[in-house]
């Protein structure tokens, strides 16, 4: 099917006052959808992630590059009245604004919802914080691993007899960014009926608690907590890592049909009839005995062999990031793209969204700090070169 339309959010403008992950990941998706995202950055250093440790692309941090493709960057000092005035001018012409300051900071800077919605009543304003604008923890800073710990998520993760472990990726930030994107799309739809914008509040802590989902409901239902299961599953088997000749395979057989199919595929139909393993309850109770048998089976062949043989059940090789990024599946799905960059061609993750008639933006890169300052101030704020030069000399813009 050939797409014929324009990107779904083309014509919308986003005023992005956020930094690090949750806000920038949301606005990156909006940029993928075609929105004009204007990223406001501290002129002295920019987004906190621009200078993160680790590999960089000619000085551009891999961390910053992960969450900022497709945006325009302005270096703007919000502590100066002239900087606030520029934000007000841009807010008047924007559909969406998003910030993730600590509670109270946006108001102190004059860029809070009350200030910006007074200028533009159609503005959809998203505020993301660690623990919410109100509540006993609202004054605290928060980072992803701490929220995993406080929500109960970390206590569920790790070896059965070992310490609790955080998830290595910033999954709470990611969940929150997706909730923010969903909320924005919903508010845009509501605006078509009401003609008004609105205020949306999200907290990383709330998103972390919501992510515990069935584990939380397990406790809320009868007061008991799911036991830590390591790489296994607390209520299903066989769900675990098994060792092939050349590495690990993960197997997740969450129902009876899948298990019976699996037994036929590995030429062990007897395992589906053995009273120790015939039902899910029996397999869960005797998971160690079953795992010992399956380890012996998997050790006879390679990961590639088992991945092909078990195509009809949930099973796959445990791959490194490098193996995954360089895999045929990633290439065929177009999940990695090469983009032009002022510092030379660069590989990056691509958008995962596929629309039949309104394609997303592709092959967009992250901006250099302040790369679009002059263009935005000229085109949207009506400032001439002399005034921009004055603002730059005063340290208001970069």
Image (cartoon, rainbow, N blue to C red):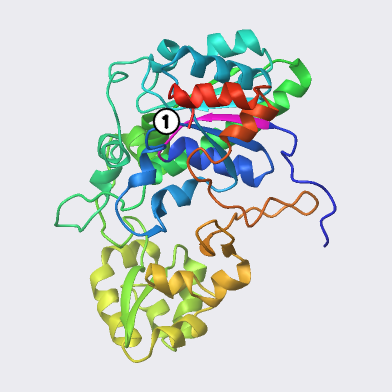
Which span is picked out in magenta? 13-20
**The residue positioned farthest toward the bottom in the image shown:** 300
- Indicate the quadrant containing the N terminus: top left, top right, bottom left or bottom right: bottom right
Horizontal and vertical percent position of residue 382: 68, 22
Q: Is residue 83 magenta?
A: no
63 lies above or below 124: below
Q: Main secondary structure of the magenta part?
A: strand
Residue at 64%, 22% (x, y): give it.
383
Q: Residue furthest front?
A: 386
**Where does residue 320 sit, x and y in percent of width and height?**
37, 71
At 28% from the left edge and 16% from the top edge, which residue is drawn? Answer: 136
Mark 1 falls on what kind of element? loop
Where's residue 117, x and y in %? 61, 12
On the image, numbered disc 1 is attached to which residue? 42
- Image-quadrant location for residue 198: top right
How many numbered callouts? 1
Mark 1 residue crowding within 10 angstroms, few (<14) / some (14–19) / many (20+): many
Measured along the vertical axis of the image, is residue 154 above or below residue 116?
below
128 horizontally vs 55: left or right: right
Is residue 134 among the parts visible in the rendering? yes
């Amino acid at each position: 099917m050939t797409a014929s339309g324009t990107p779904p959010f083309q014509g919308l403008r986003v005023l992005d006052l956020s930094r690090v992950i949750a806000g920038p990941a949301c606005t990156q998706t909006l940029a993928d959808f075609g929105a004009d995202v204007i990223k406001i950055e501290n002129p002295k250093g920019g987004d906190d992630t621009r200078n993160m440790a680790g590999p960089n692309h000619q000085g551009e941090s891999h961390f910053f590059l992960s969450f900022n493709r497709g945006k325009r960057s302005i270096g703007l000092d919000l502590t100066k009245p002239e900087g606030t005035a520029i934000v007000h001018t841009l807010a008047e012409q924007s559909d969406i604004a998003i910030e993730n300051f600590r509670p109270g900071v946006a108001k102190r800077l004059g860029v809070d919802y009350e200030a910006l919605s007074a200028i533009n009543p159609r503005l959809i304003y998203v505020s993301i914080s660690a623990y919410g604008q109100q509540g006993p923890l609202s004054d605290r800073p928060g980072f992803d691993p701490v929220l995993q710990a406080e929500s109960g998520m970390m206590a569920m993760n790790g070896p059965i007899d070992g310490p609790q472990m955080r998830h290595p990726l910033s999954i709470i930030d990611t969940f929150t960014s997706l909730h923010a994107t969903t909320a924005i799309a919903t508010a845009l739809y509501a605006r078509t009926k009401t003609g008004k914008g609105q205020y949306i509040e999200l907290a990383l802590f709330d998103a972390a608690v919501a992510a515990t989902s069935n584990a939380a409901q397990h406790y809320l239902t009868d007061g008991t907590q799911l036991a830590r299961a390591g790489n296994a599953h607390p209520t299903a088997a066989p769900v675990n890592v098994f060792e092939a000749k050349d590495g690990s395979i993960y197997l997740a057989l969450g129902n009876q049909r899948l298990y019976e199919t699996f037994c036929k595929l590995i030429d062990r139909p007897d395992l589906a009839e053995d009273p120790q393993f015939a039902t899910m309850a029996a397999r869960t109770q005797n998971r160690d005995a079953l795992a010992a048998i399956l380890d012996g089976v998997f050790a006879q062949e390679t990961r590639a062999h088992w991945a092909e043989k078990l195509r009809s059940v949930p099973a796959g090789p445990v791959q490194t990031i490098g193996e995954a990024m360089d895999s045929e599946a990633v290439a065929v799905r177009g999940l990695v793209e090469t983009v032009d960059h002022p510092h030379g061609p660069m590989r990056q993750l691509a958008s995962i969204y596929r629309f039949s008639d309104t394609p997303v933006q592709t092959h967009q890169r992250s901006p250099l700090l302040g790369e679009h300052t002059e263009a935005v101030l000229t085109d949207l704020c009506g400032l001439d070169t002399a005034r921009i030069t004055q603002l730059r000399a005063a340290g208001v813009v970069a």
